[in-house]
Each structure stands twice: as C-alpha cells, then as structure tokens.
Amino acid sequence: MPAINPPRRLLFGPGPSQVETRVYEAMAKPLVGYLDPFLYQVFDDVRSGLRTAFGTRNPYTLVIPGTGSAGMETAVTNFVDPGAKLAIFVNGFFGERIAEMGRRHGANVVRAEKPWGDVFTETEAREFLEKERPQVVAFIHGETSTGAMQPPEAITRPAHELGALVIADCVTTLGSVPIKVDETGIDIAYSCTQKGLSAPPGLSPFTVSPRAVERLNTRTTPNRIWYLDLKMLMDYYDGKKYHHTPPVPAFYALREALAAIQDEGIEQRFARHLKAHGSFVRRIEAMGLKMHVPAGHRLTTLNTPRVPEGVDDAQVRKQLLDEHGIEVAGGFGPLAGKIFRIGVMGPLANEPSLDLFFEAFGKCLTVRATA
Ligand SMILES: Cc1ncc(COP(=O)(O)O)c(C=O)c1O
C-alpha cells in the first residue's frame, strides 16, 4: 500500500472542523498505558479545560470514549430508567435522534415539536412540561441540522420547577459558544471534540451536575449499557480502576486543543467566533442571500443561509470541493435543497479565512445561478 495521502480540505462544514497542526502533532506522541500516571495528568488537564469550556464547576466532568452520539446515549442510558417519562424538544434532526434512543431504552417519550429552524419559548416549554410532568427533559443547544440555538433557560427554568433533570446536547456549541452549564441550570451536558473544540472526532466531553449525580447514586437497576455506565467510568477516572482502554492519542489531541483555547483565552475565543459570525452574515446578505434562522436565534458557529432560487446546492457544494477544496454541507429532511450549512469555527473563524471562503463561494454561486 502506498503511504496515505489525504486531500487538504478547508473544513467549512458542520464538523469535523479544521484542526491546527499542533493538535495533529500531539496525536503522534508516544503512547502510555491506561493506568500510567502521565495519562492521569492528561485526564486532569482535559477535565479542567472542559470545565472552563462548559462553564461549570462540576467535579463530575469526564470524557466518554466515543463520538457525540456516545455522549447522547450515555445521557439517556444513565438518567432515563425504562418506563420513565422523557420529554424532548424536537426542532430538528438531533432531537429526533434522542427520541429514538429514548424509545430504544424503554422510556415513555413525549415530544414538543416546532418547525426546523425555530426555537422554543419559555412559555411554550412551561405549558408542555406542566402538561406532561416528565422525570427527564432533553433539548439540543445548537441544532446542527437547522442552525438554530435554543436558549437553555427557556427549558431549564420550567423543568426545574417540576423537579425534572435537564439534558442538553452541546455537540455543536462546546468550545466556541458560551454554554454556562452552572448558570443556566443544565444538569447533564455532552458534546463532541470535532466541532467547537477543533480536535479530531472520537471523544465525547460530558458533565453532570451534583443534583444529577444524586439521582444517579439512587439508581437501583444496573445500567443497560455496560460500556457507558457513568459510575464505572468515574471509577476509572477518579478511582483508577480499569474499565476500558482509552484512545490515548485522541486524549492528547483534546488536551492540545484545550491548551490552544487556554492560550487564546476562552472569552476571547467566544468573541472571535461571534465576530466571524457577524462578518459572515453581513457578507452573505450583501450577496443577496437570506439566513434561514432569524437574528437572535442563530447558532453562531454554524450558519444556514437559504439556497437562492434557481441554484442547485449540490452542484455548488461539489464545485466548492472539487475546485477549491472547501467542504460545506447542505440541508436534509425538510430543509433538503433549501439551506447551506456553513461552519465558521476554530482556526477558520477569522477575516482572512472568510475572504478565501467568500471568493470561492461567490464564484460557485454565480456559475450555477446563470447556468
Ligand atoms: C447536535 C448534534 N448532536 C449529536 C451529534 C452526533 O455526534 P457524532 O456524529 O459525533 O456522533 C451531532 C453530530 O453532528 C450533532 O450535530
């Protein structure tokens, strides 16, 4: 076999996002064993960096070995007992995914639904939750299928009034958008490494509030998924008791990505992403395109401009990739053919990268619009 030689892409899609060289280099460092004191130092650094990114002091902040979906399943399997009522706010594809996991785990799943791209108001959430009275509530902070960002308090406030635990999917927000887990009252949050944290995929950062830990400790039935059993995972992290063999290079990469965030400063990083988003919207509107999600509800790291009339988005995306090495994504489900999904994250969230992107995007759109 010849040496592997992947194409160099500019990852302007919903994730994986661009990875800095220092992060790739960290992955090539020597392996250590699963109980090595060095690895535990890495775990400590990672867990501390993740607390900063999540905006929490939760001691129970750890990493699930698997992608964002493993975090989602960890949340469901540890906190939703079979027969328990799980209320899900569905306004896109990933709300559907949690609902499906809940069903498979034997939960009584109830859904509040809104069109893809909308968010829920506190009044809507309260009305739904008061009617359903669930034990656990789940919502998607940054809905990657639509580009909408759900304000957490609109859900956490009414949910807590009813004593329910709240699960937040922060897969597309952690690391580039403030989440403020403690301030907003999120009980369980999970994420991924390949979007806002600018590391390769493979791990799922996870955090649990003291209230939710209490609930976990009163659980009498064993978790149905041995691999994602949080108590056993915490015994590995805090008790140094073997549970599984962690993907060590992925931890090195995550540590380096968090170190890069620390070097920049988390607040500065949030501000840089917000500024890049503002610039993106101004430029897209100057081209005559419209954003799918109204201002104020936008997921600032993943922009979803509507595909202009007469433009074949698949052709535009193909041309961007073939001729410019730029990856962007299209819509799917009810938004298929209607939106582009363009991530402006990590090393690409700056003016020079946007210049590059818009030069190529402008060329590809023009060709299709006049073809
Ligand atoms: C909001 C959201 N939740 C969950 C997932 C699943 O994450 P993964 O693909 O890393 O398993 C994704 C993936 O894009 C996502 O965007």
Image (spheres, rainbow, N blue to C red):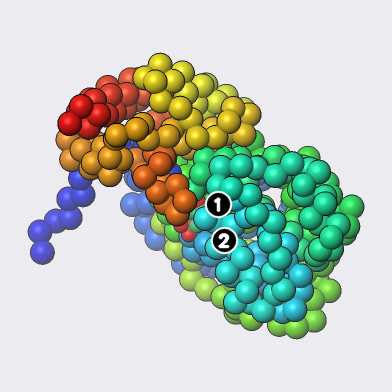
Residue at the (71%, 82%) spot, across then down: 222
- Identify residue for label 1: 92
Crowdedness of circle 2 by 10 Å Cα count: few (<14), some, many (20+)?
A: some
Residue at the (37%, 51%) spot, across then down: 27
Q: Which image quadrant: the C terminus?
A: top left
Label 2, label 1: how many angstroms apart (C-alpha)?
A: 7 Å
- Identify residue for label 2: 96
Give the farthest residue toward the front.
310
In which quadrant of the rendered view does residue 142 lie? top right
- Whether residues under marks 2 and 1 lie with C-beta atoms below 8 angstroms apart, the answer is yes
Q: Nearer the viewer, residue 203 or 111?
A: 111
Task: Classify 264 as above or below 67.
Answer: above
**Does the image show residue 54?**
yes
Task: Classify 183 as above or below 65.
Answer: above
Residue at the (23%, 41%) spot, across then down: 315
Q: Nearer the viewer, residue 38 or 154?
A: 154
Q: Please state which amino acid type lies under the numbered disc 2.
A: Glu
Residue 143, image x, y percentages? 55, 47
Mark 1 CB in 8 Å range of ligand 1?
A: yes
